[in-house]
Image (cartoon, grey):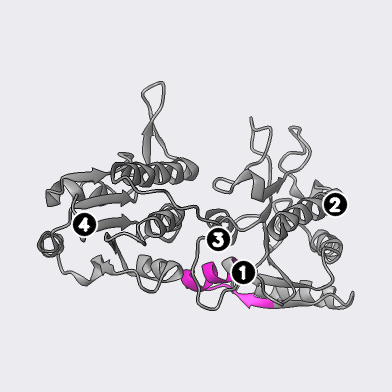
Amino acid sequence: MTSTERILVAISDDANDGLLALPALSCLIRSVNQSSYQIELLTGAQGRLIAQIFSDALPVIDESEYISSRALYQKLKENGYAGYICLSPKRRHRWLGWRLGIAQRYSTGFGQRLLWDGEAIGRVAQPNILRQGYDNLVQRFLSDQQLSCATVHPPYLAFSDLSEHRDTPTQIVVHPQVPQKHNHLLAEQYEQLLCSLDLIGKRCEFILCGATESLSYCRYLCERLAKRNIKARLCELDNDNYQLAKMVAQCDLVIGEKGLLLYFAGALDVPCVGFGALPLGVDVLRHPLANPQRCLMFSPPAGRLTQEDISLINMTDSAVRIRQWFSQLQALVVS
């Protein structure tokens, strides 16, 4: 591949799948930054917003602006790409390099997020498998082009207003769920947990996030915390994934039971704490995406009658573990 050649990189327009490609995309762009290669991103409208999280200067081709696939393919052929890297599980992206006649193509080959297990049965690919596959693709490409692989650090973002060391309180994003039977933590448990976590640093601010149906519950929790002189504020969740991801990237810790915020934290390598029921046949509850070193998961005591009752989680013990674990993470950052 000669110098000054264009390299087309495709990521999914889906917010969840698109976030999986950020670590590999970050490594790729930083590795070719000092070379003469030009990276261009192919995605949709949502993917364009995800790209803005990463870099404002990255050229983006929006698939949704073309009336047909044929018009898009014609435009891409005219650009004359010399390399294609697929960081998307979509079938149309998997075969795009072949359709365009690009000689050097890099794809995971998963297609539609399906893998092939030892018993020859199709199964859905886990997010971590996709993420590792994208990392391997970028490393293969850099190795073939004899480029050194740049080291990237979480959260892989490049906000112009995001500094590494902010003179602000420790910001902890909390995503509570409205209690229904035994499926979610109780208000008393959240109050006990957050009061204990307020001891993490001299200054601590909690951001309680909820959608329209759970915003009143978050307001109730804020009132309970205010009686204990603990600083907390509300944040209403909406469908703007760009703003949600930006908020997660700018915080110090994410706490949740399930949902998009906990998923964002795992994808962006932001420290996160999760609570959930223990599925049958599972010994340890794990985040589907997060780095185990930057994530803690808590579940009820094992047992047929207890493993689904999330209200049985001991919040005092959980708070002690979280404080110790988070303090160790902060010590590593300072060093």
Q: Amino acid at mark 2?
A: Val
Amino acid type indicated by mark 1: Glu
Mark with earlier residue (3, 1): 3
Which mark lies nearer to you, 1 or 2? 1
Mark 2: few, some, or many residues within 10 Å (few <14, many ≥20)? few
Indicate the secondary structure of the residue bearing disc 2.
Answer: helix
Secondary structure beneath disc 1?
Answer: loop
Pick whichever, 62 or 299, lies toward us: 62
State which mark lies toward you, 2 or 3: 3
Q: Amino acid at mark 4?
A: Ser
Query: Magenta residues?
Result: 234-248
- Classify residue 43 as left or right of residue 238: left
Q: CA distance from mark 3 to mark 1?
A: 10 Å
Whether 299 is among the magenta residues is: no
State how far apart marks 2 and 3 are (Cα): 25 Å
The residue that label 2 is drawn on is 320
Residue 125 at least partly seen: yes
Q: In this view of the protein, which residue sits in the foreground, 188 or 87?
A: 87
Q: Say which quarter of the image contains residue 280.
A: top right
User: Label 1 vs label 2: CA separation?
Assistant: 27 Å
Residue 155 shows which numbered tag? 3
Q: Amino acid type of disc 3?
A: Pro
| 104 relative to 31, above or below | above
Q: Which residue is mark 1?
A: 164
Nearest to viewer (mark 4 / mark 2): 4
Q: Earlier in the sequence, mark 4 or mark 2?
A: 4
